Amino acid sequence: MSVKTLSIRMNEDDYRSLVRLAKEEEGDVSKTMRELVGLGRAMLAMEKYKSGEASIEKAARIAGVSISKMLDMMKEHGITANLEAEDYLKSLDAIRKAW
């Protein structure tokens, strides 16, 4: 996987908070920012699923995880999956393609 560099602007309070969090986690600011982006993707995906803006498949894509992992994450956050027969058929088809 190639790595890209991104420069962002943030206000002083957010920056201080990021630096403090990085120190608490004994990491660096870049690593902490990457972790926050990953968490943000997951939370956005779950919110879009809850609001009906995304299917389970689309939510998984937004979060950058498998459908199975997305279902696990939703369960951890108390989000009930509204799976229909079509969702099960898509999952079965994905499994068949993987094998």
Image (tube, grey):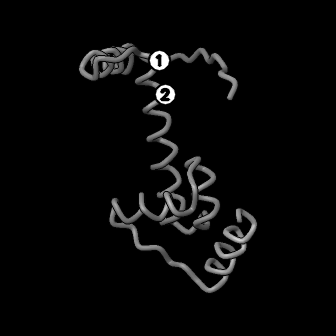
Q: Which residue occupies the foreground of this view, 38 or 11?
A: 38
Q: Is residue 12 left or right of residue 54?
A: left
- Where does the N terminus fall, quadrant-wise? top right
Q: Amino acid at mark 1?
A: Ser
Element type at mark 2: helix
Q: Which mark is residue 34?
A: 2
Q: Is residue 18 above or below residue 69?
A: above
- Which residue is outermost to the left? 24
- Which residue is outermost to the right? 97
Instruction: Estimate the x, y position of residue 23 in percent, counting from the top left.
Output: 28, 15
Residue at screen point 38% across, 13% down? 12
Q: Is residue 40 above or below residue 59?
A: above
Q: Amino acid at mark 2?
A: Arg
Q: Is residue 95 left or right of residue 63?
A: right
Element type at mark 1: helix
Q: Which mark is residue 67?
A: none
Instruction: Estimate the x, y position of residue 21 in percent, counting from the top left.
Output: 29, 22
Q: Is residue 86 above or below residue 44?
A: below
Residue at screen point 71% across, 65% down? 99
The number of numbered discs placed on residues in the rendered structure image is: 2
Q: Disc 2 and disc 1: Cα gap in Å?
A: 6 Å
Instruction: Estimate the x, y position of residue 91 in percent, counting from the top left.
Output: 64, 72
Q: Quadrant of residue 54?
A: bottom right
Query: Badge 1 is on which residue?
Result: 30
CB under 8 Å between callouts 2 and 1?
yes
Q: Residues within 10 Å of mark 2 (few under 14, many from 20)?
A: few
Residue at screen point 28% across, 23% down? 25
Q: Is residue 89 above or below residue 8?
A: below
Residue at screen point 65% across, 22% down? 3
- Which residue is outermost to the bottom? 85
